[in-house]
Image (cartoon, rainbow, N blue to C red):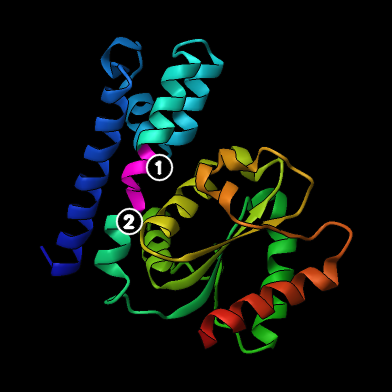
Amino acid sequence: MSPEDRDQLTRRIIRRRRIDRALASAGIDVSSLGHNEDQSLARYENPFVWVQRLHERGLVSHSAKCAVHRELRRTSVSQWARRATEAGRSILYDVLISHAQDEDGTVARTIVEHLEANGVRCWIAPRDIPPGMTWNSVIGSAVEKSRFVVTLISSASVSSQFVSAETIHGFDVGCTILPFRLEDVSDYWRIDLRLKTIQPVDYFGREEHALKDVFDALRSKKAA
């Protein structure tokens, strides 16, 4: 196993342990929920949304849901990975665009064209996925090599497990996350609750200004 693979495995194990401790502290017994293996493992992809959906289905109480969210925020699932990786991350891209490809692909490509025309190094799927490679492994590695993750917010992306996973991974490895709202979606925190703490860029009704806002944010971060 390479050192990089070993580091990734260590981060994954620690993150899972923290999530399981948060659930246990709130009295949530995963084995009693009647989930299959895939449904149970989904808690590691986005624990905030996973617990929220259990609450919406009446499987956990409001107090238990809030307790999990508090514990996850308190232990800061992302902090360990950020401290461990930020100093040694090899940055190859300025921006990774996380988006719902079928629904928001056209806008995503427009953003990439604008940024690349101004010298910004972008990564976007499926353009930058080599033939024969699995998407999950390539995208995960691309996130780790990116300074920013621009998460495109739409009615489609808030329900996308891939957008959620990419955004969460970006938080976990220390990327700067920039929510970019294509639509007036109020509950975009379903992608990751931590998005609530970040001022989004609104694209709808101000397309040209929004693209400039993204470029200015990138330039400001690079200068810092």
- Circle number at residue 95: none
Which of these two is toward me, 96 or 56?
56
Earlier in the chain: of badge 1 and badge 2, it is 1
Q: Quadrant of residue 146?
A: bottom left
- Circle number at residue 79: 2
Q: Amino acid at mark 1?
A: Arg
| Residue occupying image coordinates x 57% and y 51% | 197
Residue carrying label 1? 73
Q: How far is the residue under mark 1 from the one under mark 2?
A: 10 Å
Q: Main secondary structure of the magenta part?
A: helix
**What is the magenta range?**
72-78
Q: Is residue 129 above or below residue 76?
A: below
Q: Where is residue 38 shown, x and y percent of the image?
A: 35, 28
| Residue occupying image coordinates x 27% and y 24% | 25
Q: Quadrant of residue 160?
A: top right
- For the N terminus, give its image quadrant: bottom left
Q: Amino acid at mark 2?
A: Gln
| Residue occupying image coordinates x 52% and y 84% | 222
Q: Where is residue 122 shown, x and y percent of the image?
A: 56, 76
Q: Where is residue 83 shown, x and y percent of the image?
A: 28, 65
Name, please, the residue furthest toward the right: 205
